[in-house]
Image (tube, rainbow, N blue to C red):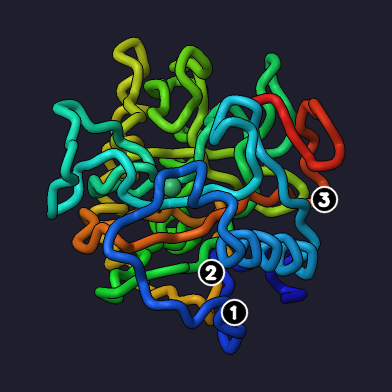
């Protein structure tokens, strides 16, 4: 936990935690408002906040994500899984509230990672996940970035620090809030964590005005991600996975079992400087 708190690990697995409920899994997911007030969901959310504290992070929420609530239920609430919902919409959003496969990404927002910029708070330093239900043992996948950064070499890395990249708006954001962005970098270096990446394979692209060397670096970065075999971990109530959101990408395959339900909380490292809307609970501008 000390090594994680120092910022030098891609992820930390916590095992041997107690199960929060022995009740049988229901036959269908509760509606989101009923889901959020369940005792077992609340206990897992609280446990996440304690675990984040143990690695020197503060649990928080963005004003434009998850209705400003700290605990996010990650489940196929909106369709797109391998088994259709009874009332499946025709256009399914690409977010943790759907069952679609999500390619490798860090969590939005994508403007900055340490210090707030132009009215946007930094991306989360960490996300912590556990499973309330995971009947088919579907894994969570992550790709540590340190070996990829090393492999790319100095020229490509320098090119990724230039502001020649753009991204599209995230479907996770509250309707009417959040925006797409231009002139952002993918990689930055700082005196705290060494390096920080902000990236999403299905939302990022290189701007067409970018120099050829930047386009080549972007292609090399994408190819290195494609070549990497992700680390896979299967979550249950007795385990938690803390992912360093500046040093690892995470992804998942299409959801096979519509009862699969993860519980997620974001955390900020102590050196991060967001735009604070409220201190307790910590709510920041996205
Ligand atoms: Fe994610």
Q: Which mark is first along the chain, 1 or 2?
A: 1
Cα distance between the residues tagged 2 and 1: 6 Å
Q: Which mark is first along the chain, 1 or 3?
A: 1
Cα distance between the residues tagged 3 and 2: 20 Å
Is residue 251 depicted above or below 118 in this figure?
A: below
The residue drawn where x is 37% and y is 52% is: 75
The residue drawn where x is 50% and y is 76% is: 237
What x and y, as percent, mark residue 125? 65, 49
Q: Is mark 1 on a helix, strand or loop?
A: strand
What x and y, as percent, mark residue 204? 36, 29
Mark 1 Cα within 10 Å, few/some/many (few <14, many 20+)? few
The residue drawn where x is 26% and y is 48% is: 99
Circles 3 and 2: CB atoms closer than 8 Å: no
Is residue 135 depicted above or below 258 in this figure?
A: below
Residue pushed farthest right?
Answer: 279
Mark 3 Cα within 10 Å, few/some/many (few <14, many 20+)? few
Residue labelled 2 has its Cβ within 8 Å of some atom of ligand 1: no
Residue labelled 1 has its Cβ within 8 Å of some atom of ligand 1: no
Q: Name the residue under label 1.
A: 14
What x and y, as percent, mark residue 35? 49, 51
Q: Mark 2 points at which residue?
A: 241
Report the disc number at residue 270: 3
Mark 2 Cα within 10 Å, few/some/many (few <14, many 20+)? many
The quadrant in which the C terminus is found is top right
């Amino acid at each position: 936990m000390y090594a994680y708190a120092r910022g030098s690990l891609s992820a930390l697995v916590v095992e041997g935690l107690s199960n929060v409920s022995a009740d049988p899994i229901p036959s269908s997911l509760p509606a989101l408002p009923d889901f959020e007030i369940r005792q077992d969901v609340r206990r897992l959310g609280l446990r996440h906040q304690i675990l984040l504290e143990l690695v020197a992070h503060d649990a928080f929420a963005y004003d434009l994500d998850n209705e400003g609530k700290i605990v996010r239920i990650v489940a196929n609430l909106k369709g797109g899984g391998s088994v259709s919902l009874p009332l499946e919409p025709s256009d399914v959003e690409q977010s943790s509230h759907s069952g679609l496969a999500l390619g490798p990404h860090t969590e939005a927002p994508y403007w900055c990672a340490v210090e707030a910029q132009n009215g946007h708070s930094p991306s989360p330093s960490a996300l912590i996940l556990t499973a309330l239900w995971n009947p088919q043992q579907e894994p969570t996948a992550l790709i540590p970035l340190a070996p990829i950064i090393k492999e790319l070499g100095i020229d490509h890395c320098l090119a990724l620090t230039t502001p020649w990249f753009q991204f599209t708006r995230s479907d996770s954001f509250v309707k009417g809030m959040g925006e797409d962005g231009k002139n952002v970098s993918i990689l930055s270096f700082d005196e705290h964590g060494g390096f920080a990446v902000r990236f999403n394979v299905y939302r990022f692209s290189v701007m067409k005005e970018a120099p050829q060397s930047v386009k080549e670096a972007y292609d090399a970065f994408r190819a290195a991600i494609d070549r990497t075999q992700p680390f896979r971990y299967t979550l249950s109530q007795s385990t938690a996975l803390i992912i360093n959101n500046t040093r690892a990408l995470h992804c998942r395959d299409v959801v096979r079992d519509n009862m699969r339900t993860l519980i997620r909380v974001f955390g900020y490292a102590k050196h991060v400087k967001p735009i604070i809307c409220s201190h307790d609970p910590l709510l920041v501008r996205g």
